[in-house]
Amino acid sequence: SLCDWSSDVCSSDLQGESTTASHTIESDRDIDINFIGHAEGSININAGTADVIVEGGIENASGDTTILTGGSISTTSSFDASATGSIGGRLVTLSAGGTLGSEGRPLRTDLSNSQTPTRLDATTTNGEIYIQEVNGDLAIGRITAGSDQNVTLTTNQSIRRASTGASSLISGGAISLYAEGDIGNAAESSTILIDTGINEGDLLRATSTIGGVHVKEAT
């Protein structure tokens, strides 16, 4: 018996006779494909005691982005917007021994606008916090500047309490909040909670261009 599998034709000799048989194999059946892996990305950077300088964009619209260091964390920027670093993610956690950004060059964050809920947690042991949300609402979690250092938060839209994770609180020496839209909300559960320092210069400054300001001292 001889078979040509490429053409699916078999021939066999039976007592001097030749028999030809044709077979059909279905090739249009459904094929199940499953992907393995995580539905969300995760970016974790632990720099030890070194400073972290983000020169480009960290993009992670659906996942967690965490940067830990005993030094400082900053993003590059230029006045003509030709070089801008930013730290993106749905949930962004920043922890530094030193400063987060600086007065003239705030650290730039870019919380996701396509995935929810979003949240920013930022903590320093002994350093000021200067953060600018570059594209959308700034959903704050725990913002803590250790050793009575100052906190400044800025966004081109609204500053609001995060809807997930631990309760929101901005803690530091002097606290400055700047937004185009609302800062907090009139509802008690959406009011921005702050904990300013006890020194003479530890004041609250809150400015909204077209929205309302709803802030409450926690202690």
Image: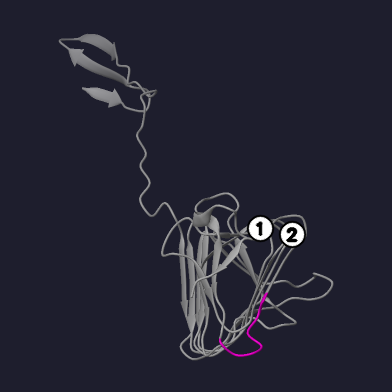
**In this view of the protein, which residue sits in the foreground, 4 or 214?**
214
Tag 2 and tag 1, C-beta contact below 8 Å: yes
Q: Amino acid at mark 1?
A: Ser
Magenta residue span:
198-204
The residue that disc 2 covers is 180
Residue at 49%, 91% (x, y): give it.
49
Drawn side of residue 35 relative to residue 115, left or right: left
Q: Is residue 200 magenta?
A: yes
Label 2 crowd bin: few (<14), some (14–19), many (20+), radius 10 Å: some
In this rendering, position of residue 141 left or right of residue 205: left
What residue sits right under mark 1 in the picture?
158
Looking at the image, which residue is at 67% across and 61% down? 213
In the structure shown, which secondary structural element does the residue marked by tag 1 occupy?
A: loop
Q: Amino acid at mark 2?
A: Glu
At x 75%, y 73%, the residue is 83
Residue 209 picture location, percent across and down: 77, 60
x, y percent for residue 119? 51, 62
State whether residue 96 is above or below residue 164. Answer: below
